[in-house]
Amino acid sequence: MPRLVLRNLASSHLDPNLLLILGSSWRDLGVWQLGFFTVWFLMRSWVIDLMKFLAAQCIVIHHLLSYGPMRDVLEREYPRIVDALFTGSRLAVQLFLVIGGYLTAQSLMRARGAHLGDLLVKRYLRLTPFYLMSLVICAAVVGALGDWVCQDWVPEGVTWTQLLAHALLLQGVLHVPSMSAGVWYVAIDFQLFAMVAFLASLCRKNGWTSIKVSANLIWVLALLTFSSLWFFNLTQTWDDWAIYFMGAYGLGLLAAFAARFDNARPLFFAVWLFGWVSLTQFWRVRILVALMGAILLYCYADHSGEFLSPAFKRRLSQLGNAAYATFLNHFAWVVIFSALWNAADLHGVVQALVMILLCWFSALAWGLVLHRFVEPCLSQALTGLQRGLSRLGFGPKPMESFH
């Protein structure tokens, strides 16, 4: 089918409410029957691309300042700066949660009528192949270079139980030692998606095995978001479970529904304002970031970005799409550069800063390479496998990924 890229929505005479974000911030392949032909469009949200890229870089910086001998050198000389960067950069997780909620809401609106089981299987298959490959890469790097690092943050040898728990995304709830930094987020993302998808099917009036975005669903999600902001997010007892993160994720969900449905806007703003009120009782910077991220997406996720050049948007889309690869694979580079530091017997603040910057740029470049050359191969192989299984009557039919 031909695709028409609309660079200026305002001049396209098309209803903006028909635009749905999907995939890695790709908009839905919308269809209009105009006379005897169909117009297809494909647009990106440059705001989401930018937020994903910046959030991924903040997570990389956070882990660079969490582990390694270079970090130890910088902390001795500049403890306040390192602590401020360490604390501030970890807040990017809240942006990932808000964006994840926003994109999930768009996916559910697009997936109306889809079977719950199919939706969960597709989501799992969207997340795990590249995730497991990244864990194998990290385990190989640690196995090869771990002795050169000799620090307690380096994961120990991988066991089959540990690998199985990670494959099932249960390492957090089972309290299994993590194989890499930050991979807990993938498990939480799946928990949140599964919970929202289950509620979307449960809130249907007729049956509960298929997906539908209803007023009942939006009210239930608003109540869960409120309960997380005022109760569950206050204690780390719940931080292995989706409900702990539902405050930020739910704000993203409600922002997307408010942008799409007029009658959902008062509910979104009510929960958003109650979130601010909760900060007066229980101050949390992470919730402040989530509140700001949610209102930013509500106001600007659909912004055309007409002041940006097409070339800049293309580069930004590449960086945004590569955020997942960068996020999953940067820890291996921390191990590599820590081993290089010890093997070369390096010292000094300048050398530590140079090595950290080189590690950062290497992780970014490696993420781009994996996204450009490896992710498409995994996706094609998985699609072929799904098609073969569907012909045999097993598993869901292939479809576009969610986000």
Image (tube, rainbow, N blue to C red):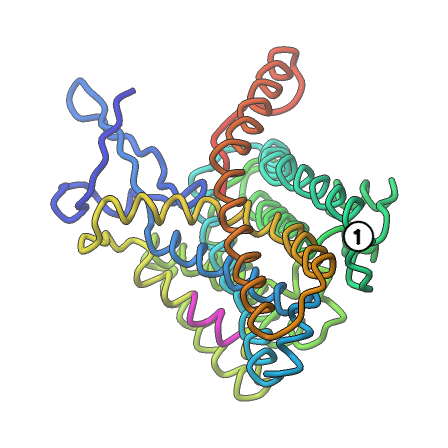
Image point (17%, 18%), residue name? 36
Q: Residues within 10 Å of mark 1 (few under 14, many from 20)?
A: many
Circle 1 sits in a helix, a strand or a loop, which is it?
helix
Image point (23%, 54%), residue name? 305
| Residue 196 point in image, percent of width and height | 58, 50
Image point (67%, 82%), residue name? 76
325 above or below 178? above
State whether residue 87 appears in this view: yes
87 above or below 62? below
Main SS of the magenta segment?
A: helix
Left or right of residue 162: residue 11: left
Q: Report the span colored magenta.
A: 287-293
Magenta-span inclusion, residue 309: no
Asked whether 352 or 158 is in front, the reply is 352
Q: How many numbered markers are drawn?
A: 1
Image point (57%, 52%), residue name? 327
Residue behind mark 1: 146
Q: Quadrant of residue 6?
A: top left
| Residue 235 point in image, percent of width and height | 71, 75
227 above or below 298? below
Most distant residue in the top direction: 392
Task: Say which quadrant the N terminus sits in.
Answer: top left
Q: Which amino acid type is marked by label 1?
A: Gly
260 above or below 136? below
Left or right of residue 365: residue 49: left
| Residue 336 point in image, percent of width and height | 68, 52
Asked whether 309 or 124 is in front, the reply is 309
Asked whether 326 or 39 is in front, the reply is 326
State whether residue 188 appears in this view: no
| Residue 45 point in image, percent of width and height | 33, 49
